[in-house]
Image: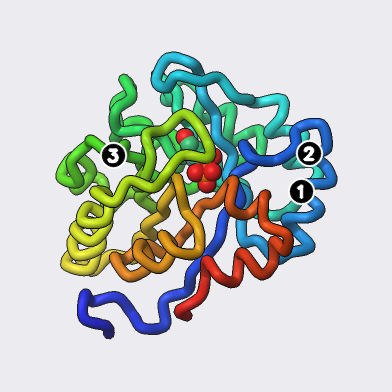
């Protein structure tokens, strides 16, 4: 075990955020993700209410599901996730994360995601304290820590989120749970090292991965330190 209680053999996974893909060539972009050994595909759903942007939704997810067997990690940035989680699971989501800042009851949302056959994850925005999600830790597979304000790709990493990642990792270890910490926003080779060190093990990356000349090498840099 390392200093902060994580296993030294922790496996780091990279999830490619589709938001940064070329939407007109989405099929080719997915082939590229597969070819470069990316671990999962991160699918950002925004309703223009919980966050200041509107992205894509169920029909696109269904099309992506038909195209690939890569795990689909659906990040719901929507006001009432409880109303839609079953349909996202039916459309092919393997993991569904919803925001603690949303209006849905968190316990009921987690239960409904799991009953629908997907894995449940809980997301929190940069200004939300870690303590808000602690009571849900035994019931989720992943905590999604936003390292930028949700809504847009290509923003800069907020350094103030690092202590929160560390606190959540300590809590998970203290409870003896096996819960992933996924980080999302502004992740590149430099910030990846910082969040890995704080206890994150799933790294979402949009602009850094898609702008890289060599996506495979970029993903290896994100995972480096194994
Ligand atoms: C932001 C989204 C992120 C975003 C990450 O609200 O949740 O998944 O696409 O993009 P980058 O890696 O460019 O910050
Ligand atoms: Zn996201």
Q: Nearer the viewer, residue 75 or 165?
A: 165
Q: Is residue 117 visible?
A: no
Q: Residues within 10 Å of mark 1 (few under 14, many from 20)?
A: many
Q: Is residue 74 left or right of residue 131?
A: right
Tell me the tag on residue 30: 1
SS at circle 3: loop
CB of mark 3 near ligand 1 (< 8 Å): no
Rendered residue at 35%/60% (across/down): 179
Q: Earlier in the sequence, mark 2 or mark 3?
A: 2
Label 3 – label 1 distance at C-alpha: 29 Å
CB of mark 1 near ligand 1 (< 8 Å): no
Tell me the tag on residue 26: 2
Are the residues tagged 2 and 1 within 8 Å (C-beta)?
yes
Task: Report x, y in % for residue 124.
Answer: 31, 39
Task: Report x, y in % for residue 76.
Answer: 48, 31
Rendered residue at 52%/66% (across/down): 222
SS at circle 2: helix
């Amino acid at each position: 075990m390392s200093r902060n209680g994580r296993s030294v053999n922790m496996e780091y996974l990279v999830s490619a955020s589709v938001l940064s893909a070329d939407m007109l060539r989405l099929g080719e972009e997915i082939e590229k993700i597969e070819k470069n050994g990316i671990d999962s595909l991160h699918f950002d759903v925004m309703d223009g209410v919980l966050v200041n942007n509107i992205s894509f939704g169920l029909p696109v997810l269904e099309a992506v599901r038909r195209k690939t067997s890569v795990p689909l990690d659906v990040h719901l940035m929507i006001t009432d996730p409880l109303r839609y989680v079953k349909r996202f699971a039916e459309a092919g989501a393997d993991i569904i994360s919803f925001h603690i800042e949303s209006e849905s009851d968190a316990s009921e949302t987690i239960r409904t995601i799991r009953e629908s056959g997907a894995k449940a994850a809980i997301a929190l925005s940069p200004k939300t304290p870690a303590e808000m999600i602690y009571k849900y830790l035994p019931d989720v597979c992943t905590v999604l820590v936003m390292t930028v304000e949700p809504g847009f790709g290509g923003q800069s990493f907020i350094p103030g989120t690092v202590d929160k990642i560390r606190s959540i990792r300590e809590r998970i270890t203290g409870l003896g749970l096996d819960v992933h910490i996924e980080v999302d926003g502004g992740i590149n080779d430099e910030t990846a090292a910082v969040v890995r060190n704080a206890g994150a093990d799933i790294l979402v990356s949009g602009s850094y991965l898609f702008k890289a000349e060599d996506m495979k090498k970029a993903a290896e840099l994100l995972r480096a330190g194994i």
